[in-house]
Image: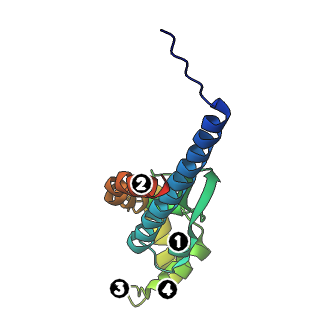
Amino acid sequence: MNINIDVDTNSAIIRLKGMMTKSIDAIDRAAKRWIHLVNRDAKLDAADASGQLKNSIKVKQTGQASYESSPEVKHGQWVENGSKPGGAPKLADLLDWIKIRGIIPHNSNDTPIRLARAIRNKIATKGIKAQPYMQPSHDKNKDKLRPMLEQHLRGAL
């Protein structure tokens, strides 16, 4: 007894390619949705006197189904990770920060410039304590990624 099976491989390949395309598109949508959650929470949690850091946190697409959220200002890394002794911000930046925060020297004889110099010296000798906002945002949302992927994949197939 002979059994012949005739499979239309071209049709099967076309269907598989279509399923793969739909799957990749679904994964891309889920990844994009998830990174925007991380981005939103990072903006809410960032320690930022002027709003400059929060406004600089952006989502960038780095490839298909590949996204990143990060601040575009240089000091964002120092807020997130802190810094060791050695470096110090510019006096003009510290004066702006003092003004924005409404900081008034305790001693009436001190001036904002003297206060800025004291803060700068402290940063240079002790560094800056970390105030993470990106990593906690990632940690808060990491368990949401898999369900989002599953939901989007179910809808695609």
Tell whether 133 sits left or right of 111: left
Residue occupied by mark 1: 53
Labels 1, 4: front one: 1
Residue occupied by mark 2: 154
Q: Please, what is the three-letter code of the amino acid marked with disc 1?
A: Leu
Is the Cβ of the residue at disc 1 closer than 8 Å to that at disc 3? no
Labels 4, 2: front one: 2
Q: Earlier in the sequence, mark 4 or mark 2?
A: 4
How many marks do you count on the picture?
4
Q: CA distance from mark 2 to mark 3?
A: 62 Å
Q: Earlier in the sequence, mark 2 or mark 1?
A: 1
| Dot 2 alpha-carbon crowd within 10 angstroms: few under 14, some 14 to 19, many 20 or more | few
Is the Cβ of the residue at disc 4 closer than 8 Å to that at disc 3? no
Residue occupied by mark 4: 100
Q: CA distance from mark 1 to mark 3?
A: 28 Å
Q: Earlier in the sequence, mark 4 or mark 3?
A: 4
Q: Earlier in the sequence, mark 2 or mark 3?
A: 3
Q: Earlier in the sequence, mark 1 or mark 3?
A: 1
